[in-house]
C-alpha cells in the first residue's frame, strides 16, 4: 500500500496489527510526505519525527510479542489507534514540544505534560508526529503568526486554509495526517474543515472535559474520513482515566468517575442502526442580510438540498430565504449576544498591555475598530451575565421551535468559501484591522455562522465537504447542527448525507 494518507485511521491500525504493514513504515511514509510537500503549505510547524519513529518501532515489537503470546486481541481492545500517526493543533500541550499559540514571547516554551485529550489519544495508541499552525491567540479565520509564519490552503497557495485550526485542516487535506485534534471558540474547527474539504466536529459544550475557563470554546476531532469522527468522540467521551505521569500507562481508575462517564456514553442519543436518509428531518438556514452568503455558497447549498430531496431525504425544509423567524430572535440579536460573551472571554485572556491597546486612542476613520476594541476593554461582569441569560433563551427557542420538528439545522459554515489571504497584524486580527471586509461587510461578521450557531448555543455541529467549486477548484462545505448531546446523531447524519452524495475524498492537486 503506497497511499496510506487515503485510508481512515481504523484501516491503518488494522494494517499494523495484522502485520500487513508496520507502524514504522507508515509513519515514515507520512514523514516523507511532510518533508516533500509541506514547504509551500507550512501546516506542520512543530515536528517530532525522531521520537515518533522510536515509538513506532516499539509498537511493531509490541505487536509481534503479543501475537506470539496469543494476547493481541485483548491488548488492542482499548488501543484502537495503536501505532497510527497523527498531528495535533499547536495550542494543545504535548509533553516535550513547544506550545506558543503563535506568541513570540512564548517561543521555546516547552510543555511538561500532555493535555488530557492528547493523553487519551496516546493511551489509545496514537503516535504524535507533529503540531500544526494557528493564528496568534487562536483568534482569526486565517492561520498566521510571527513565530511560524503563514499557512496556505493546499488547494491554492493564494487562499487561506481558515483558522484557527487552519494548520490542522491543511495537514489533513494535504495528506500529512488522517486524524487531528482541533479546538473551536468561533468556528475554529468547522470553518477550516470546510475551507479544506475535510470533516470537523464541534462537540456539545462540556461533553469532553477540558481545563478551560472559556465558556464558548471546546476541543474536537478533525478527520479525513467521517468514520473517524465517531472513533475519536468515543475515545474522548469514554476516556477511563488519564495517566498523571504521561507514561501512557493507565492510572488507577476512579471507579465512580468511570461509571459516570460510561453511563453518559451509553445514554447519549443515537439513531437506530436501521436509520436511513429517509428518516432525517432537516431545516435549512441559508442566508442572512447582515451576514451575507456569497452567490457560489448559496448555489452550492441549493444544489445540496436538491440532491438530498432526490435521494429521498425525509424532510428538507428550505422554504425560508433568509433567517429562521420561528425562533423569535433576529440574527443581529444573536450575534450581539455571542460577541458580548466573546469579548468577555478575550478580556480575561489578554495581557495588561494588550488590554491597554484595546482602549485606544484610534483615528477618526477607525470608529468600528474603536467600538470593537473598547468593548473588550470595558466589558462588565453584568453585561456578560445578561448575555448569558439571553443565550439560554436563544437555545430554548431553538429547542422549542426548531428541534421539536426537525433533527438538524443545515447551514453555511461561513459567508464564503476559502478567501484570499488578507494581510493583518498577528495580534487580534478580528478586531485590530476592521477595514478588511468579506462580501462587503466587516470581516468579523464571518464568525456569525459558526460562533452563533454552535458555540453560543453549545450545540454539536459537524462540517462536511460536498463539492469542489467549478470556477476555482476550492472546496465547498456546510455544517449540520443538532441539539445538545446529539453529537453521535449529528455525525451519523453527516455520514448518511455523504453516502447519499457518494462523496469521494477530495484531494488538492499537489500530488
Image: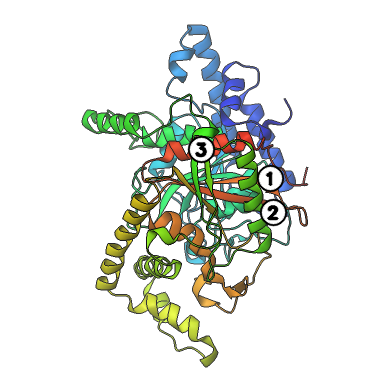
- Name the N-terminal-most of marks 1 and 2: 2
Residue 495 drawn above or below residue 15: below
Left or right: 53 as drawn, with respect to 400: right
Quadrant the C terminus occupies = top right
Instruction: Identify the residue shown where x is 57% and y is 64%.
Output: 145
Q: Earlier in the sequence, mark 3 or mark 1?
A: 1
Name of the residue lying farthest toward the left: 256
Q: Which residue is mark 1?
A: 174
Q: Which residue is pictured at 61% across the width and 50% down the height?
A: 477
How far from the left and from the top, in percent, is residue 48? 57, 42
Residue 45 in picture, x, y percent from top left: 60, 52
Left or right: 401, with 468 as reference point: left
Residue depth check, mark 3 versus mark 1: number of the one nearer the observer? 3
Q: Percent x, y for residue 221?
A: 49, 42
Rendering quarter of residue 435: bottom right
Q: Which residue is mark 3?
A: 493
In this view, the residue in front, 107 or 92, is 92
Amino acid at each position: 500500500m503506497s497511499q496510506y494518507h487515503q485510508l481512515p485511521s481504523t484501516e491503518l491500525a488494522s494494517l499494523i496489527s495484522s502485520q500487513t504493514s508496520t507502524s514504522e513504515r507508515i509513519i515514515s511514509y507520512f514523514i516523507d510526505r511532510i518533508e516533500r510537500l509541506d514547504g509551500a503549505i507550512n501546516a506542520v510547524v512543530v515536528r517530532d519525527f525522531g521520537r515518533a519513529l522510536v515509538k513506532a518501532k516499539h509498537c511493531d515489537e509490541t505487536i509481534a510479542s503479543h501475537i506470539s503470546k496469543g494476547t493481541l486481541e485483548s491488548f488492542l481492545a482499548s488501543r484502537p489507534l495503536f501505532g497510527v500517526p497523527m498531528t495535533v493543533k499547536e495550542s494543545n500541550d504535548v509533553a516535550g514540544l513547544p506550545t506558543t499559540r503563535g506568541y513570540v514571547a512564548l517561543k521555546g516554551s516547552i510543555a511538561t505534560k500532555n493535555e488530557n485529550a492528547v493523553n487519551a489519544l496516546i493511551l489509545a495508541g496514537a503516535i504524535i508526529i507533529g503540531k500544526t499552525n494557528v493564528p496568534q491567540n487562536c483568534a482569526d479565520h486565517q492561520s498566521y503568526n510571527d513565530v511560524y509564519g503563514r499557512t496556505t490552503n493546499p488547494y491554492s497557495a493564494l487562499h487561506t486554509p481558515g483558522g484557527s485550526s487552519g494548520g490542522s485542516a491543511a495537514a489533513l487535506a494535504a495528506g500529512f495526517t488522517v486524524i487531528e485534534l482541533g479546538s473551536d471558540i468561533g468556528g475554529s474547527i468547522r470553518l477550516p474543515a470546510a475551507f479544506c474539504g475535510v470533516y470537523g466536529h464541534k462537540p456539545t459544550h462540556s461533553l469532553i472535559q477540558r481545563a478551560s475557563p472559556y465558556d464558548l470554546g471546546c476541543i474536537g476531532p478533525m478527520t479525513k474520513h467521517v468514520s473517524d469522527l465517531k472513533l475519536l468522540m468515543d475515545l474522548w467521551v469514554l476516556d477511563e482515566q488519564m495517566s498523571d505521569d504521561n507514561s501512557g500507562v493507565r492510572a488507577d481508575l476512579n471507579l465512580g468517575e468511570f461509571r459516570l462517564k460510561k453511563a453518559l456514553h451509553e445514554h447519549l442519543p443515537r439513531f437506530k442502526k436501521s436509520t436511513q436518509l429517509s428518516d432525517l428531518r432537516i431545516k435549512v438556514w441559508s442566508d442572512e442580510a447582515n451576514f451575507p452568503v456569497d452567490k457560489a455558497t448559496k448555489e452550492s447549498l441549493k444544489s445540496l438540498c436538491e440532491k438530498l430531496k432526490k435521494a429521498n431525504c425525509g424532510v428538507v425544509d428550505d422554504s425560508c430565504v433568509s433567517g429562521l423567524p420561528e425562533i423569535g430572535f433576529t440574527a443581529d440579536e444573536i450575534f450581539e449576544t455571542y460577541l458580548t460573551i466573546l469579548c468577555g472571554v478575550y478580556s480575561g485572556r489578554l495581557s495588561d498591555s494588550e488590554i491597554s491597546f484595546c482602549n485606544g486612542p484610534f483615528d477618526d476613520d477607525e470608529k468600528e475598530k474603536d467600538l470593537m476594541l473598547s468593548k473588550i476593554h470595558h466589558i462588565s461582569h453584568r453585561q456578560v451575565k445578561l448575555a448569558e441569560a439571553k443565550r439560554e433563551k436563544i437555545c430554548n427557542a431553538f429547542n422549542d421551535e426548531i428541534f421539536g420538528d426537525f433533527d438538524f439545522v443545515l447551514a453555511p459554515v461561513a459567508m464564503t468559501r476559502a478567501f484570499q489571504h488578507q494581510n493583518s497584524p498577528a495580534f487580534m486580527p478580528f478586531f485590530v484591522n476592521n477595514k478588511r471586509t468579506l462580501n462587503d461587510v466587516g470581516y468579523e461578521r464571518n464568525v456569525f455562522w459558526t460562533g452563533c450557531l454552535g458555540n453560543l448555543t453549545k450545540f454539536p455541529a459537524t462540517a462536511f465537504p460536498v463539492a469542489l467549486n467549478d470556477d476555482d477548484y476550492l472546496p465547498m462545505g456546510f455544517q449540520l447542527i443538532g441539539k445538545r448531546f446529539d453529537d453521535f446523531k449529528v455525525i451519523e447524519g453527516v455520514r448518511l448525507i455523504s453516502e447519499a452524495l457518494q462523496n469521494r475524498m477530495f484531494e488538492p492537486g499537489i500530488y
